[in-house]
Amino acid sequence: MGRKNYTSEIYNLPDASDVILCGWVQEIRKLGNIAFLILRDREGVAQITVMKNSIGNEKFREITGLNRESVICVKGKINKNTQSKLGAEVIPDNVEILSVAETPLPMGVIDRVSVDLETRLDVRFMDLRRPEILSVFKIESNIGKSIRRKLEDEGFIEIHTPKIIATATEGGTELFRLKYFEKDAYLVQSPQLYKQIMMSAGFERVYEIAPAFRAEEHNTSRHLNEFVSVDIEMSFADEEDVMNLLENVVFYSLKYVKENNINDLKTLNLDIEIPELPFPRLKYDDLLNYVNSQGINMKFGEDFSSEALNVIGKKYTGFYFITRWPMETRAFYVMPYDDDPKYGKAFDLMFGEREITSGAQRNHIYSSLKENMVKKGLNPENFRFYLDAFRYGMPPHAGWAIGLERLTMILTDSKNIREVTLFPRDRKRIEP
RNA sequence: GCCCCGGUGGUGUAGUGGCCUAUCAUAUGGGACUGUCACUCCCAUGACCUGGGUUCAAAUCCCAGCCGGGGCGCCA
């Protein structure tokens, strides 16, 4: 097909330059013997001005009769002396029709009628053509890229742990069961146990960006049954160390997006406010007292309800940590405090009322870990592969997991997690 | 999983027993137009989620199912 240009280039290239633009026919405005065709590609739009006199009657009819969203390549010359509000246009020498779109479209890409999220997800390939949707995913891409960069700079090794497992992982959540030849197997809810095993393996600092699966029948705007988990685990570190790392990762990521997605932020009409470091550390007990003082009845040992988080989120609108959680609210692998084992060295990173990360220093003491497992009603026999890693030299370690979609929601101000997921998997949806 | 709400042309909606042969916008098909940029104008096409019930009469009321939305629980 040879070299082609992006539509965005025509605004920078000199007048009368030859270009080849390929993309989708967004719109055709026909006015008798002149027509304006708006061509869209990944980088923007360009006006193709077609005149019957110069291109010929037959070709004019063919081009202006194209269905919207057909794919074409236009070979032509840039005209900067245009009356177009875009500032430049292309006068075509030749238009090649590569794919004719059927009609009517299942949803309009630029139509002035709103489309339900449900309909959009049903025809996601079409929905994703909308520039503001593309911008969301460009931002999500750069969030992932910036996190990777930061972690690589900090000496983390990228790993890939299995997504098919034999036994229940951490308990607490339902798992998807599947057939694995003659055995039953499950999809992982998180790489937690494996990344901990990697600490015993001596990798010291690892990270993984991969899907996690939860068979919970939740039906909300912030839960998916398959989501992308950004996990890290770090040896010879406590919860403070990984909280420091986490806030620096988030800080770096926000800055990276603010500096590298300027057009996307403009498209979405967003401004990213860079928070100050360090993020506030708020103790569970203090927040418990606070919500009780605000008329919410909550007992020690309970998790914060949505109602409670809404109250807290009104007071703390940006990023903050909730620290020093009661052990009963946390998973078995959390390390209790020496001075007061009622509490665990666990934290959540919050943004207003929204939870985006949870983490902790892990319990690396074999006997104590096993004991906590039993307390949580788990059978240590089922976790042999995991527990054995603690018996032959396991360093103290800590880690966390960010929900990639949750972080993207915050940066893009999205109201529904499905907006920031290409092909979401929820209680009802397994296709497309 | 629980509570509440909803399902009308391709898309988004109005209509809550008869005025519905169903509103409006957008889209689609045809036509007019040489500088549009939310182009404009004319004509046309196109819909009451499924099944059962109540009634002289159902898009509208009742029941069941399917699908969806909001909230909760749970979490990333």
Image: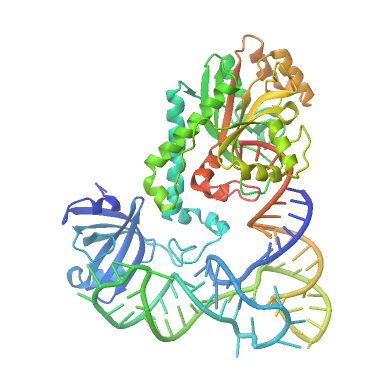
Q: Position of residue A360 (x, y in %)?
A: 63, 25
Q: Position of residue A170 (x, y in %)?
A: 69, 28
Name the residue at 50% across, 31% down: A277
- Left or right: residue A91 versus residue A251 is left
Residue B16 image-quadrant placement: bottom right
- Left or right: residue A418 versus residue A31 is right
Taking depth in this image into account, of A316 and A428 the one nearest to the observer is: A316
Q: Position of residue A394 (x, y in %)?
A: 61, 12
- Residue A53, compared with residue A404, is above or below; it is below
- Residue A227, compared with residue A277, is above or below; it is below
Would residue A304 be seen by someone viewing this image from the given angle? Answer: no
Taking depth in this image into account, of A173 and B49 the one nearest to the observer is: A173
- Left or right: residue A32 versus residue A300 is left
Q: Residue furthest left?
A: A16
Residue A197 image-quadrant placement: top right
Name the residue at 26% across, 61% down: A95
- Residue B14, compared with residue A138, is above or below; it is below
Would residue A48 be seen by someone viewing this image from the given angle? Answer: yes
